Amino acid sequence: MEISGVPHPTETKLLRRSKGNARTEQAAREAIAGKRKGIRAMLPFVGPAFIASIAYVDPGNFATNIESGAQFGYRMLWVVVLANVMAMLLQNLSAKLGIATGKNLPEMCREHFPKWLSYLMWGFSEVAAMATDLAEFLGASLALHLLFGLPMLSATLVTGVVTYLILMMERLGFRPMEKFIAAFALFIGASYLIETVLSRPDLSQIVYHSVVPWIGNKDSILLAVGVIGATVMPHAIYLHSSLTQNRVRPRSDEEAFKIHRFSTREVVIAMGFAGFINIAMMYMAAAVFHDTGHAQVADIQSAYQTLTPLLGSAAATVFLLSLLASGVSSSVVGTMAGQVIMQGFVGFSIPMWLRRVLTMLPTVIIVALGTDPTMTLVISQVVLSLVLPAPILALIYFTKRKDLMGVLVNKPWITWASILVGAIILLLNVWLIYQIVAEI
């Protein structure tokens, strides 16, 4: 029975959520008006890019970066740098689309593309979401398995429950979720700072191979496509526009410019941080495995087992804890993106618990079949790279249209740079397909 004058618990949660969002918007308005300076001005805008950045340090990155570093040493660092520059450009475009139009990328596709094309893109996006979730679940499950000795199937179910509970934080507003995800990102970054100190990589090799391209053979190209697929994530491109579309709505052209300027700074910081983590993953594997004669290390489990005698149990434990944080947080972000993709492309959504169950199923099946987790992770990243051109082309198409973007329309050089990014990804995909067909 309700007591007169006492709000219902649900109403209390909605009120708390509304107040939290309103406080963030008020702080953002003060920053736009110049009443906040320095870091205080930036803080209200920090969140969307950090949520998106988690997709760039998920377990798929662990798999592709470790295998690349172990097999080819420092020579593939340039691929990580290239992928990270691509990510900065594309995530900035996605954030700008949400700010300028008040709509996310899937919604824009549904409104402006033929219905058949919107449904086709939705289908490909769902495949990408499944590949993403596969990597995230497998990574977190493998970490739980190695840390606590849980059977892989049990670890997968535990991961599903934990991520669902974290997703419930969305009911409190966007700010608590942003802070939670940012904390995970900082933990992963701190873990790889520790790994850098312990592994003592060759700085000159890092600098040289970060800027000098090296192609190698078909195995390195497969991994290069995987690295790009693991770094430039389709679902993150879709999600970022939804995180900015209603956060702080511009009331004038001047406000639109200022909001986008703050957003761009956040993208550079968040994606730069994710880029450091990816580079650190690869040079740690190069220093610890490739340079010590352990180039055969090609999976996460053997990486953990090899780390223990080489660097000690502390380094191995930090490695697994970072993998666990990566898997759990990226799985949360992946589920959020899945809801945005379905709602945007086809205009309906399903309960969060049902999406959580459906996206878990492929992982549960693969774990039950006893498939090699790391090879599955690498293949999932290749699938992501194959799906990636569709959202990139759609993003370029919308952000170059002045009638949609207004004052935030792309400058010509940005459009051409985005087209170049799409062409590079398409070229790598064609090369990969050619190599596969040639072996048949």
Image (cartoon, rainbow, N blue to C red):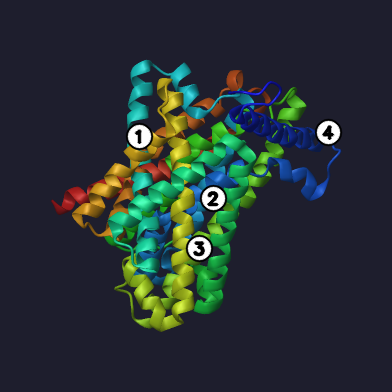
User: How far apart are the two marked residues, 1 and 3, measured between alpha carbons?
Assistant: 29 Å
Q: Nearer the viewer, residue 242 or 322?
A: 322
Residue at the image position 45 percent from the left and 59 percent from the top: 324
Chain-order first, disc 3 or disc 2: 2
Tag 2 residue: 85
Chain-order first, disc 2 or disc 1: 2
Tag 1 residue: 126
The three-letter code of the residue at mark 2 reads Val
The three-letter code of the residue at mark 4 reads Ala
User: How far apart are the two marked residues, 1 and 4, measured between alpha carbons?
Assistant: 41 Å
Which of the image's four quarters has the N terminus? top right
- In the rendered image, residue 365, in percent from the top left (x then y), is placed at 23, 48
The three-letter code of the residue at mark 3 reads Ile
Q: Is residue 82 left or right of residue 245?
A: left
Q: Marks 4 and 2: which is nearer the front?
A: 4
Chain-order first, disc 4 or disc 2: 4
- Determine whether the residue tagged by mark 3 lies in a helix, strand or loop: helix
Tag 3 residue: 279
Q: Are marks 3 and 2 in contact (CB under 8 Å)?
A: no
Q: Marks 3 and 2: which is nearer the front?
A: 3
- Determine whether the residue tagged by mark 4 lies in a helix, strand or loop: loop
Q: Quadrant of residue 260?
A: top right
- In the rendered image, residue 35, in percent from the top left (x then y), is placed at 86, 38
Chain-order first, disc 1 or disc 4: 4
Which mark is on residue 33? 4
Q: Nearer the viewer, residue 29 or 349?
A: 349
Q: Does 398 sit above or below residue 49?
A: above
Q: Could you classify mark 4 by the number of other residues whose Cα lies within 10 Å: few (under 14), some (14-19), or many (20 or more)?
A: few
Q: Does 203 sit above or below residue 162?
A: below
